[in-house]
């Protein structure tokens, strides 16, 4: 791919930051008159192709890092689940990654969400963009699926995000008992008063505004738990007696489901109502144990993900 030829002395091009789908890049900005005539959509496609070429050309480094909040005292249920899903995905791709905990990880992320990975000079956040980024480097868990199976996989991933992730956010920020006893103390723990309270209330306002927009603000906790049960029922029926959702090989759906279900099963909350919904489906519990043993206990046992997985193991029902 060729860039415009105005990259020379006296050019109007300047180096500046550009964010593409959760990626931070430094590309050329302020094009001259000729380049300004390019439609915005074409420029976006050109930039995306440029990003993909760079990503594909560089091998996966040994010092790749995954960033999340502080594990013991700060990270919340939903972020922990999302982080574990990405860790599981990378383990399934056999790509090494070091988990780095930072109090300000949420503010370091290009999308404002965790986790995010740093691979060389490239930063990518959230599971979806990370899957695409890894695919550009030649690693994919779903290449063996046909088009119908890929569409089905994406539908179930949407189900998990729309039900489980949203239920986790609701429980964290809309259930008053959980908010007071767990969410506010943990979320603001790295910061002094009054900043800890200000940041927690700001985040709570943002999440509750989102809940109102999607129609969850008026739901009771019982209704949310019923949604979780229906989601688990659908996942249980799709999994059946198979080791993974698409038979013998894991896909990004398996990584996503594991991240959320395992975290729900192993996180101490104000009550066991949420985890009990998952425990009602023995094949889902066995699925979590299978992935934990194969991709965490049998891999790098010194990693943060493995340590967290092993320390939480006793919470999984037999």
Image (spheres, grey):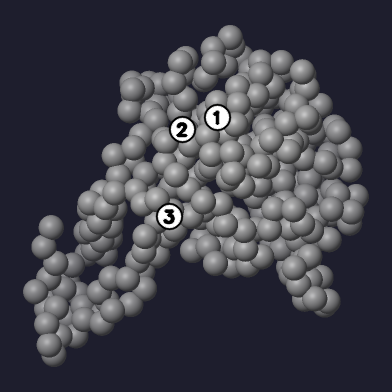
> Which residue in the structure is indicated by mark 3?
63
Q: Earlier in the sequence, mark 1 or mark 2?
A: 2
Closer-to-camera residue (97/276): 97
Q: CA distance from mark 1 to mark 2?
A: 12 Å
Left or right: where 64 falls relative to 187: left
Q: Tell me the SS state at disc 1.
A: loop
Residue 22 visible to an observer of this rendering = no
Residue sitting farthest toward the front = 302
> Which residue in the structure is indicated by mark 2?
92
Could you tell me which residue is drawn at 74 percent across and 36 percent down? 312
Q: CA distance from mark 2 to mark 3?
A: 18 Å
Closer-to-camera residue (274/85): 85
Residue 294 on image: x %, y %: 55, 26
Q: Tell me the SS state at disc 3.
A: loop
User: Depth-wise, is mark 2 or mark 3 nearer the camera?
Assistant: 3
Binning the other alpha carbons within 10 Å of mark 2 as few (below 14), some (14 to 19) or many (20 upward) gives many
Count of labels in the image: 3
* Quadrant position of residue 297: top right
**Circles 2 and 3 in contact, beta carbons < 8 Å:** no
Binning the other alpha carbons within 10 Å of mark 1 as few (below 14), some (14 to 19) or many (20 upward) gives few
Which of the image's four quarters has the N terminus? bottom left
Residue 298: mark in rendering: 1
Left or right: where 302 falls relative to 315: left
Residue sitting farthest toward the top = 241
């Amino acid at each position: 791919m060729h860039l415009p030829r105005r990259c020379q002395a006296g050019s109007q091009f300047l180096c500046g930051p550009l964010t593409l789908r959760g990626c931070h890049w430094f590309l050329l900005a302020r094009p001259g008159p000729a380049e300004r005539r390019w439609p915005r959509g074409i420029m976006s496609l050109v930039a995306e192709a440029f990003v993909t070429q760079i990503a594909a050309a560089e091998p996966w480094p040994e010092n790749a890092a995954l960033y999340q909040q502080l594990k013991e005292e700060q990270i919340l249920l939903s972020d922990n689940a999302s982080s574990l899903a990405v860790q599981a995905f990378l383990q399934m791709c056999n790509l090494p990654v070091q988990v780095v905990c930072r109090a300000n990880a949420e503010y370091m992320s290009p999308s404002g969400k965790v986790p995010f990975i740093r691979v060389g000079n490239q930063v990518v956040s959230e599971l979806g963009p990370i899957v695409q980024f890894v695919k550009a480097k030649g690693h994919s868990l779903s290449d063996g699926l046909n088009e119908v199976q890929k569409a089905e996989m994406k539908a179930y991933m949407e189900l998990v995000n729309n039900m489980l992730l949203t239920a986790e956010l609701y429980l964290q920020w809309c259930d008053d008992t959980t908010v007071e006893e767990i969410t506010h103390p943990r979320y603001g723990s790295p910061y002094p008063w009054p900043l800890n309270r200000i940041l927690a209330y700001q985040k709570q306002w943002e999440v509750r505004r989102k809940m109102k927009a999607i129609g969850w603000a008026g739901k009771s906790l019982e209704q949310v738990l019923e949604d979780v049960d229906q989601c688990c029922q659908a996942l249980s029926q799709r999994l059946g007696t198979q080791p993974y959702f698409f038979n013998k090989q894991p896909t990004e759906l398996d990584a996503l489901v594991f991240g959320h279900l395992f975290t729900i099963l192993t996180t101490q909350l104000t009550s066991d109502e949420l985890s009990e919904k998952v425990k009602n489906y023995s094949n889902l519990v066995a699925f979590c144990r299978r992935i934990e043993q194969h991709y965490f206990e049998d891999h790098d046992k010194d990693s943060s993900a493995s340590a967290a997985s092993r320390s939480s193991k006793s919470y999984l029902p037999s």
